[in-house]
């Protein structure tokens, strides 16, 4: 089972997936958390576990911001507008020169959820 949901704290679009172990019995209540802000976004009975990842569109937006900040390329206004929820929740910061940055703790959170930002 897989579905999309929005994190109530940081408004990030997420994909929640149930990974069943396929064994009879043993169902327990499990939780899934936003990989960026650690807010609980899913809770249900399962015999497996819950995996929560950023939706591909959200990961691509963070990837674009990451590469633009590394290369010193200004972002078009529509990309900055798309990042409004990330900026409001502190996932993306605005530097003194107006450029967007992704803090190292957010980069580490993405790595630990198998969605690292890659240097292009």
Image (cartoon, rainbow, N blue to C red):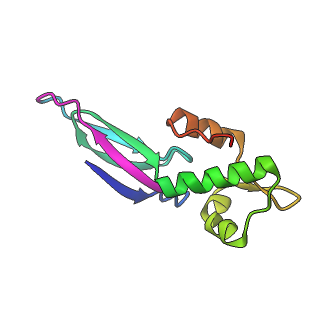
| Residue at (40% x, 51% y) in the render | 15
Residue at horizontal 74 percent and vertical 63 percent from the top: 75
Image x and y of residue 58, in percent:
53, 56
Above or below, comparing residue 23 to residue 110 in the picture:
above
Q: For this view, does 54 lie left or right of residue 103?
A: left
Q: Is residue 93 left or right of residue 40?
A: right
Q: Is residue 17 left or right of residue 116?
A: left
Above or below 69: residue 106: above
Instruction: Report whether residue 101 is seen.
Output: no
Q: Which residue sits furthest left?
A: 24
Residue at figure coordinates x 60%, y 57% from the top left? 61
In front of the other: 4 or 116: 116
Q: How many marks?
A: 0
- Above or below for 29 versus 82: above
Residue 5 image point, x, y percent = 39, 58
Quadrant into which the C terminus falls: top right
Q: Is residue 40 magenta?
A: no
Residue 109 drawn at (x, y percent): 58, 38
Quadrant in the picture for residue 82: bottom right
| Residue farthest toward the right in the current orientation of the protein | 97
Q: Residue at x 56, y 57 (%)?
A: 10
Q: Nearer the viewer, residue 20 or 29?
A: 20
Residue 106 visible within the image: yes
Magenta range is 13-24
**Coordinates of residue 38 in the picture (x, y in percent):** 52, 44
């Amino acid at each position: 089972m897989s579905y999309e949901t929005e994190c109530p704290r940081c408004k990030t679009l997420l994909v929640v997936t149930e990974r069943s172990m396929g064994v009879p019995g043993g169902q327990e209540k499990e939780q899934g958390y936003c990989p960026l802000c650690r807010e609980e976004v899913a809770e249900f009975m399962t015999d497996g576990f819950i995996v929560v990842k950023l939706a591909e569109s959200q990961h691509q937006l963070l990837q674009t911001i990451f590469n633009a900040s590394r290369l010193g390329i200004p972002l078009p206004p529509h990309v900055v507008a798309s990042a409004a929820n990330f900026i409001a929740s502190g996932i993306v910061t605005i530097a003194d020169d107006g450029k967007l940055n992704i803090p190292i703790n957010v980069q580490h959170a993405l790595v630990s959820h198998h969605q690292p930002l890659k240097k292009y």
